[in-house]
Amino acid sequence: MQQNITPLTEWDLNGSEREMDISKVVRKAYSLWPWIILCVLMSGVLAFIYFYFAIPVYKINAKILIKDDDSKTGNGSGDMSMLKNIGLLSGTSNVDNELEIVKSYTLMNKVVQDLQLNVVYEVRKPLKAVEIYGKQVPFKLHFLSFNDSLLNSGTFSCEVSIHKTGITLKEKNHVYDAKWQDTVLLSVGKALLELNHDFKGAYEKLYGVAVFTPAAVTRNYMNMLDAAIPNKQVSTINLSLPASIPEKGVVVVNRLIKEYMQANVDDNNRIADSTMAFIDTRLVVVGDQLQDIEKQIQDFKQRNELADLGEQAKALIINTGDYTKQMADQEVQLNVIESLENYLQDNIDNPRVVPASLIVQDATLSAVISQYNLLLMQRTRLLLSSTESNPVVINIDEQLKVLRGNMLHGIASVKRSAQTALASLRGNAGHLQAEIRRVPAKERVYLDYSRQQAIRQELYLFLLQKREEAAISRSSTVANIRIIDAAQSDPLPFQPQKRLILALAVLGGMILPFLIVYAKDKLNTRLSEKKDIEAITSVPIIGEIGHSDGSEFVVVAARSRASISEQFRALRTSLQFLLTKKNDNVVMVTSSISGEGKSFISTNLATILAIAGKRVVLMELDLRKPKIFTSLGIKPDKGFSQYAVGLATAEEIIQPSGIHRNLYLISSGPIPPNPAELLLQESTSQLLDKLKEDFDYVIIDTTPNLVTDAQLLSAYAHTTLYIVRMNYTRKQQVGLVNALYKAGKMPRLNLVVNDIRQGKYSGGYYGYGYGNEYGYGDYVEDEHIKKRSMKHFFGSKS
């Protein structure tokens, strides 16, 4: 029966499998530790070489604030308000627009040209050149002009050596000697040689100067510059620039901010200048228009004899009122006079006192009336004590009569004067009324002129005011940004990250051997582990044989406790479980190709069976390429090929092995031209029947399965041992074994794994090692076994 002898290490328990996997990794690492150390050292050396050539890069950071319109202070905001007032500005910039300006080519190109960043200074060191800047440079070439046609065609470079009085420049085939403060005419342009008085270090042997195209340098800095807005809730811009020299990076970022601020100021100044120019132009136009309208007003006043139409109209109205009042007074006076005249005429015969309220404003008449009233009062008092015939009374009556006539005469005169004055007042009032009726037309024309004059005058004054504001604003213009954080460098470079690179180098050095082994295993078409066999075939593995150094063909001995001897003993035990029937004693040993160790396995298996007290015959039936007798150093007399053709008997071809008294050998004999036909002879069957009767075990060492010999002999075998050799047998050949097993072409087909090397095979018996690990090696061993146990079993088996 067939049994799959499963080693103890292949338990199906998850915990045991996991433990086995971990131990396998540990064993793999242990086997590779010299390579791991070597790879770690090599990767460390490569890392330090990289550090030598790598340029450290520092991060330069800065932060600026873009002021909002409502937060701007100073005259700058006044400019914006003024421009809005006169309609010259409808919108304002925001932080997104300013971000694009900061990242613009024009701004960076201005920085590159001002600082001459396209001129790079280097120190030449072994296998590399190190850039220097600022105080690290003992000299400076300040280019006054560039040869653009030559510079655009490529990069200019030269070597510089310094001496006491100046420097020597070597440019291709040209050599220039220059003293300090000299102007050097190079192929790339004209440069002024200056001594850097801030340089404190020691002069190097050789310096280098490289000049690049400003446009290329500008684009390079633009690509490196990182300008971003942290979030939409703020109006700040974060600037970041990687730089190999922190001092240079700080200068570049600060200069960029300065140029941006200056550009902002220039923009505001341009706005103020354009505003002033616009206002000046408008002042000329409005001034001319104001002069024209003032001249028209002057002509209008001269034609109409007007000084001030409003005042004159007002005066006319006032005069008309005066005349009306005077006319009313005059009419009242005339009425008084007429009333007084009627009063006197009505009382001629009855003199009475003239009322005081009727006294007119005439001195002569008033005097006459007063005298008349006095005489009348005197007459009244005399009549109280006398009669009218009294001479005094008569005299007074005469005087009263004369005074009454004078009063009437005076009243008539005053009446005529009043009538004349009234007529005159009425004429003058009519004239004024006519003038007043003509005033609205003149006033309308005058008001139109005045309105045009007022509009132009107000516009002229407004423009004068705004021009003065613009002039004041230009003289005090400030940028609408504020520097929150000036440019500063990080204390440590962010490239290269030495700790990370060293860690990766160590880790890579540790992993590289495993990767190489893994890749080798994946690319390997030969068997390297037991799982390679199990993945391809279901044929049971009956034995696992370790590696032999090849110094001896027979590696088993009666008293040997070497691991390989124990492995053959284990194979012997497994074979006994296969050959359980009484007459099952024929074992055929074959393989896929030559060199897999079937002769080695056959010989040592036969020997270990003989040591166990069994009579064993080993038949060398590899009639094409026999090897056993040659390897044992035995010269055969007659062999199977001679027996098959009738030239020898069975007794003649069986000979003692000389290895053990129970082991006998049958050689192949001379190599025949038709091995397959010989195996088909009846004599072959007869020979095997005889051997089965005379011996306990018949071991047949046959040809590889590439030819038909093994399949022909399988008809006589009770079990078949198919040899596969680690790191020799190809995986596709194991697939052929699986096909034979499934087709049943060979009886009781089992695998024997040969040439297992310690630490490279996850196997069963050899994995647990029937050798020194569990103390079997403490027993007395043969001297040759002791020597062999000190080696790693390098070499090959036959």
Image (tube, rainbow, N blue to C red):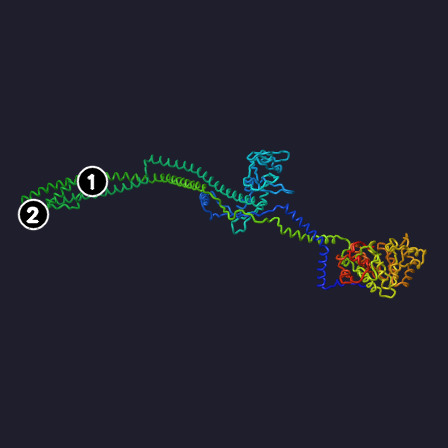
Query: Which disc is residue 317 wearing?
Result: none
Quadrant where the C terminus lies? bottom right
- The residue sitting at 32% across, 35% down in the picture is 305
Q: Is residue 234 left or right of residue 637?
A: left
The total of numbered circles placed on residues is: 2
Q: Residue at x 94, y 55 (%)?
A: 647
Tag 2, which secondary structure? helix
Residue type beneath disc 2: Leu
Which corner quadrant of the image does residue 158 belong to?
Answer: top right
Q: Which numbered circle lies on residue 418? A: 1
Q: Cα distance, mark 2 to mark 1? A: 38 Å
Binning the other alpha carbons within 10 Å of mark 2 as few (below 14), some (14 to 19) or many (20 upward) gives some
Q: Looking at numbered disc 1 in the image, what kind of residue is underneath it?
A: Ala
Q: Secondary structure at mark 1?
A: helix
Q: Locate residue 100, reporting x and y percent.
A: 54, 45
Q: Quadrant of residue 285?
A: top left
Where is residue 6 shown, x and y percent of the image? 77, 63
Q: Nearer the viewer, residue 61 or 606?
A: 606
The residue wearing badge 2 is 383
Q: Nearer the viewer, residue 590 or 432?
A: 590
Q: Quadrant of the N terminus?
A: bottom right
Left or right: where 734 falls relative to 446: right
